[in-house]
């Protein structure tokens, strides 16, 4: 029989890494299971982070690496594996992965969230051929070209600002006449000469043979359609939680794992931290706070157990 951990942390974005740091400082026997060898979650593909205290204007990748280095320096243990399910019967839980099974007293689910899809014709067919979900990853392919960003949240605005530095022209297609993202970002976006806002419009379909050639949008108020000649379409319409492996094990709400600020789920000894849990504000700073709260919950559970 292998080792029994105090806590298995699933995911190595800001929430998982903060939990790893707090676990090391609390001298818990912890392991972090990460799907990809490069830690960081969504922060890795963020061009610039300007609202994490103490490190103004840092690149997302650099911030993610700083979190990871911090956890490494404190001695956190990482393993690359993919979680299939958690068996929660009895005091010792089993985290069953494709590679191994990890036995533990508690679990922190910090699997974050992925990109939401639009579900329109052409999106799937032209994915990787001009349709992208990550401007910082793929933006460089569109130097001097015309692109469209779909969405009106922080990610859409940041993507459009980033692309405006590379592209000849950037359309921002938003379904309302008001953006959702941070006011400071909105101001910056609306001041850019090569950005055209396409308000009150939804994407109908993406057209092209082997590569994106056109984005067809329709105005929700006038019902008029418009064809935008673009070579790239960046979809930034929000996130969807990475929680499928935990369905039926913990209570969920719209796919998010139901948990309050203490990160405790409906299953005793199982905690949810970061973007994967129900919460009002999904930011790096709140994900990091969850990591700390979840470890406090773990310590309490272990002493009461
Ligand atoms: P988000 O804030 O949920 O925004 C999604 C945007 O897409 C909204 O403008 C929404 O329109 C639009 N949308 C959703 N479904 C759509 C559809 N089917 N068709 C067309 N448009 C659609 O998501 P996000 O921008 O990906 O950000 C995710 C989370 O990370 C947020 O909590 C965000 O605040 C946070 N974040 C923060 C920062 C930062 O602070 N710098 C940076 C990145 C991300 P409506 O506005 O009409 O709903």
Image: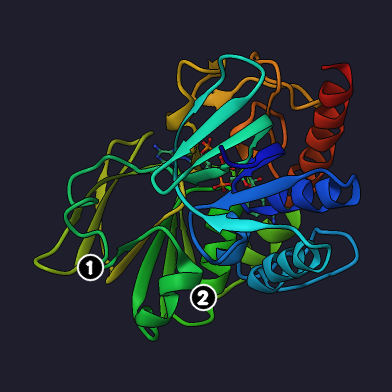
On the image, the x and y values in percent for residue 19 come to 77, 46
| Relative depth, front residue between 302 and 126 | 302
What residue is rendered at 67% in x and 18% in y?
91
Numbered mark located on residue 10 in the image: none
Task: Give the quadrant of residue 147.
Answer: bottom left
Image quarter where ligand 1 lies = top right
Classed neighbour count for the residue bearing mark 1: other residues with Cα under 10 Å, few (<14), some (14–19), many (≥20)? some
Q: Secondary structure at mark 1?
A: loop
On the image, the x and y values in percent for residue 140 come to 42, 81
Query: In the rendered image of this protein, does residue 88 appear above or below residue 64?
Result: above
Asked if marks 2 and 1 touch (Cβ < 8 Å), the reply is: no
Classed neighbour count for the residue bearing mark 2: other residues with Cα under 10 Å, few (<14), some (14–19), many (≥20)? many
What residue is rendered at 84% in x and 52% in y?
24
Side of 5 where 299 appears, left or right:
right
Q: Answer yes or no: is residue 299 visible.
A: yes
* Disc nearer the start of the sequence (2/1): 1
| Relative depth, front residue between 141 and 95 | 95
Side of 159 where 206 appears, left or right:
left
Query: In the rendered image of this protein, does residue 105 appear above or below residue 98?
Result: above
Distance from label 2 to label 1 (Cα)?
A: 20 Å
Q: Answer yes or no: is residue 274 visible.
A: no
Numbered mark located on residue 129 in the image: 1
User: Where does the C terminus fall, quadrant-wise?
Assistant: top right
Q: How is the image coloured?
A: rainbow
Mark 2 sits on what residue?
Answer: 164
Q: Give the farthest residue toward the bottom.
A: 144
Q: Is mark 2 within 8 Å of ligand 1?
A: no
On the image, the x and y values in percent for residue 214 come to 21, 62
What residue is rendered at 77% in x and 42% in y?
291
């Amino acid at each position: 029989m292998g080792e029994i951990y105090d806590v298995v942390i699933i995911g190595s974005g800001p929430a998982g890494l903060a939990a790893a740091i707090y676990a090391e400082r609390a001298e818990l026997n912890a392991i972090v299971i990460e799907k990809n060898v490069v830690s960081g979650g969504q922060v890795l593909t963020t061009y610039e982070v300007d609202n994490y205290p103490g490190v103004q204007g840092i690149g997302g990748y650099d911030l993610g690496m700083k979190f990871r280095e911090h956890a490494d320096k404190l001695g956190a243990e990482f393993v690359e594996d993919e979680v299939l399910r958690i068996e929660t019967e009895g005091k010792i839980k089993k985290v069953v992965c494709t590679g191994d099974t990890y036995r533990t007293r508690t679990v922190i689910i910090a699997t974050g969230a992925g990109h939401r899809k639009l579900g329109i014709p052409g999106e799937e067919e032209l994915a990787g051929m001009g349709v992208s979900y990550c401007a910082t990853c793929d933006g460089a392919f569109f130097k001097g070209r015309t692109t469209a960003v779909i969405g009106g949240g922080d990610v859409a605005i940041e993507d459009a600002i980033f692309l405006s530095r590379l592209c000849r022209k950037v359309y921002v297609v938003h379904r309302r006449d008001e953006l959702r993202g941070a006011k400071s970002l909105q101001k910056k976006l609306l001041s850019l000469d090569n950005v055209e806002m396409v308000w009150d419009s939804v994407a109908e379909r993406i057209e092209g043979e082997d590569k994106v050639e056109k984005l067809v949008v329709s105005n929700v108020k006038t019902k008029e359609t418009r064809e935008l000649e673009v070579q790239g379409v960046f979809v930034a319409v929000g996130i969807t939680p990475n929680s499928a492996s935990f369905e039926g094990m913990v209570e969920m709400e719209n796919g998010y794992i139901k948990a309050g600020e203490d990160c405790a789920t409906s299953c005793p000894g199982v905690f949810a931290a970061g973007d994967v849990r129900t919460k009002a504000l999904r930011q790096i700073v709140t994900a990091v706070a969850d990591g700390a709260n979840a470890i406090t919950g773990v310590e309490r559970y272990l002493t009461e157990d």
